[in-house]
Image (cartoon, coloured by chain):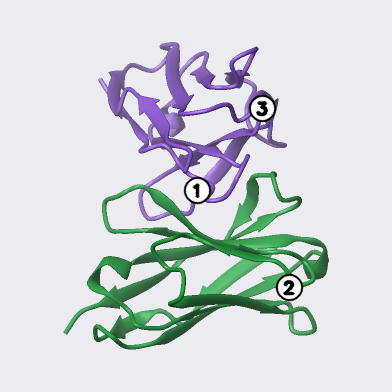
Amino acid sequence: EVQLVESGGGLVQPGGSLRLSCAASGFTFSSYWMHWVRQAPGKGLVWVSRINGAGTSTSYADSVKGRFTISRDNAKNTLYLQMNSLRAEDTAVYYCARVRYSSSPGDYWGQGTLVTVSS
Amino acid sequence: DIQMTQSPSSLSASVGDRVTITCRASQSISSDLNWYQQKPGKAPKLLSYAASSLQSGVPSRFSGSGSGTSGTDFTLTISSLQPEDFATYFCQQSYSTPQTFGQGTKVEIK
């Protein structure tokens, strides 16, 4: 059974840092692109970042470029999102999603982890 | 960035109704259009991908269509609305990054 479990969310002050993790199981992790998508409270879905299976190709939304870093450890079947210089507008539930090819949809999603940026 | 515009933003319907949600891309996205269903407090669930392919396990009352020659206009149809279908629906283009989403359509009980 495919499972994606996010962790690492919490309350952080503006300007602070947080690292999210997404533990994957039930599939060959290294064969899939992985994405992060976020959703501010009561709002829509916003794509954040993606990484290819080998970890050699990454992309970011302009709103997080230079502040967030996506990475993966295929030996540990884990996806990461390092978030620095956090702002109030980064407050959201962050989901990881599995994607087979670069133009494929997210066919499995984690349950999400809430990040709250507030003083 | 490619803008995705969904309509309507919300609708009220009764069980058994036929429901249609549209999604328009600001430029051609070929057939790289996906539909998701999201219920409160839950992760999005993939319903349809590549404009018209139904995800495994999704009831056949859901169908996606569109693209045609323009590659910009797409539709999600629920042929006979069921109680478990009351949710918010999002379209997403996976043609290019950033992979943008529509603003969502909330389907409520009439």
Callout 3: SS: loop
Q: Nearer the viewer, residue B1 or A118?
A: B1
Of labels 3 and 1, earlier in sequence is 3
Callout 1: SS: loop
Residue picked out by circle 2 = A55
Callout 2: SS: loop
Q: Amino acid at mark 2?
A: Gly
User: Mark 3 falls within which chain?
Assistant: B
B32 sits left or right of B4 in the view: right
Q: Position of residue A88 (x, y in %)?
A: 23, 72
A30 sits left or right of A22 in the view: right
Q: Quadrant of residue B48?
A: top right
Tell me the residue at 74%/84% (across/down): A76
Do labels 3 and 2 touch, CB within 8 Å?
A: no
- The chain letter of the green chain reads A
Q: Say few, some or many: other residues with alpha carbon within 10 Å of mark 1 (under 14 / 14 to 19 / 20 or more).
A: many
- The chain letter of the purple chain reads B
Tell me the residue at 64%/22% (across/down): B60
Q: Is residue B34 above or below residue B72?
A: below
B37 sits left or right of B11 in the view: right
Residue picked out by circle 3 = B31
Q: Nearer the viewer, mark 3 or mark 1?
A: 3
Q: CA distance from mark 3 to mark 1?
A: 20 Å
Residue picked out by circle 1 = B44
Tell me the residue at 24%/83% (across/down): A14
Residue A18: give its label: none
